[in-house]
Image: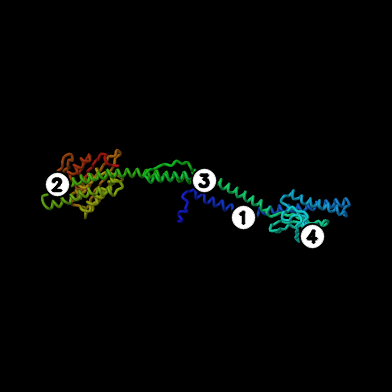
Amino acid sequence: MQLRNLIPNSIFMYILIPVAGAAVVSALLFNLLLTPVFINHFTRRSTADLELATSLGLEHCEENFLNLLSLRLSDDQMMVETMYQESLRGITQIHKQMASVHMLAVSSSGRVDASTYPELPTGSDFKVPDFWSGETRELRVKGQKILYRSAYFPFWRVHIVAVVPLEFISAPVQLMQQGLLIALVAISFILLLTLLITLNYAVKRPLNRVITATREISRGAFPYIESVRKDEIGEVCTAINVMSRQLKENHTALERSIAEKNVLLQEIHHRVKDNLNVVVSLLHLQSDQVENHRQAKEVLNSSCDRIYSMALVHEKLYQSESFSHIDLEAYIQSIADQLFSIYGQNKAIDKIIRGRHIFIDLSVAMPCGLILNELITNSLLHAFPNQNSGKIEIIVEEQAEGNLVLTYSDNGIGIKQEPDFSTPQTTLGLSLIHILGQQLGAKVELNTHHGYWLRLRIPRQGTV
């Protein structure tokens, strides 16, 4: 038999086995500890009965002897014998008064003249032990142990013997042991039954509810366990409820996130397709302006910058916690760093970007990125022709109604003829700013007299 087959499969067995074992051990301990106590108690009682019985026997003999003396018949052998027989009857009558004590009258010659003890009937021989008559001893008579006490009456030369068989002492002890054992078993049974009932209502049923709840949780359900208890079982139920509620919230959030990401993935595929179309359109527009190989190289470089600003949006999206919004300040900083590394080498041009904690979605980020790409490129290439230092400042603000204000400025030479963004422009860069501003529905403000200053007021559509 394997050891695991001996392991209980119910919580009741974990209680029943120790309690039953404790009851058995308790019964054995009670038996071992109380048996000597009971035996000593009944031995003392029997010793007292023996002392009383021998005293009563002596009293009968003395009483009859005094009667002879009072009648002055002590020399009359017939009366002496009569009184002796009367004394013997008085001695044997003591057994009727004290049922546990047997009485014997033994002559000095060793003959039993009267007896109530079946093992030593009248007429049998019994040698009285040779020790002091007032002492109680334990003897063995014909294989039976007895407590023995005697007294000697010299007139009739008779030994008055009181005997208590030890079985009379052990019998009540055994009865008391049986009674204690039955009482102990009954008490243990009642306690065990009470304990099992309590465990069933206080432990097993709540645990079954907890087990059922955990199984339902594993299947995707999120139950609530009704419990008003304040003990450990109540704490377990509370913990299960908290876990169930949190798992339900997490499950709901996960389902919502998966649904959102599915929609966003479709949107991203759509946006990527649109962005590729924009790339194709930009290349077509710039191909019309190519007149020689040098211009072709410049056109390709500017196209790469525009494509990078578009790709950067997707990079910021998958690096952010949300796939639908990006940090506008970090996005602008990345575009500026890229363009400065290409066109701002050997120039001490400072860039200032401010716009903390503003997040926008893809539909706003892409046009803003392309506009800033054109503005920063133009500033680095044309705003500082005869100087190696300057400043470019980009400030993004979110107004109370949620509208976005993007302000771009540099302290370069500016441009002589201020463009009109209400009409199509001659250069591709200005055309892009015009088209993308219309796409955003933005209101454009421009000042080119002292450097270049442009402000876009973008209505609320993708800020958070």
Q: Residues within 10 Å of mark 1 (few under 14, many from 20)?
A: few
> Which residue has dot 3 on it?
196
SS under mark 2: helix
Residue 283 place in picture, x, y as percent? 15, 48
Q: Are marks 4 and 3 in contact (CB under 8 Å)?
A: no
SS under mark 1: helix
Question: Can you tell which of label 2 and label 4 is closer to the viewer?
Answer: 4
SS under mark 3: helix
Badge count: 4
Tell me: residue 68, above or below residue 457: below
> Which residue has dot 2 on it?
284
Tell me: residue 361, above or below residue 157: above
Give the alpha-carbon distance from disc 2 to disc 1, as whole Å.
110 Å
The three-letter amino acid code for the residue at tag 2 is: His
Q: Residue 22 or 252: which is nearer the viewer?
A: 22
Give the alpha-carbon distance from disc 2 to disc 4, as whole Å.
155 Å
Q: Are marks 2 and 1 in contact (CB under 8 Å)?
A: no
The three-letter amino acid code for the residue at tag 1 is: Leu
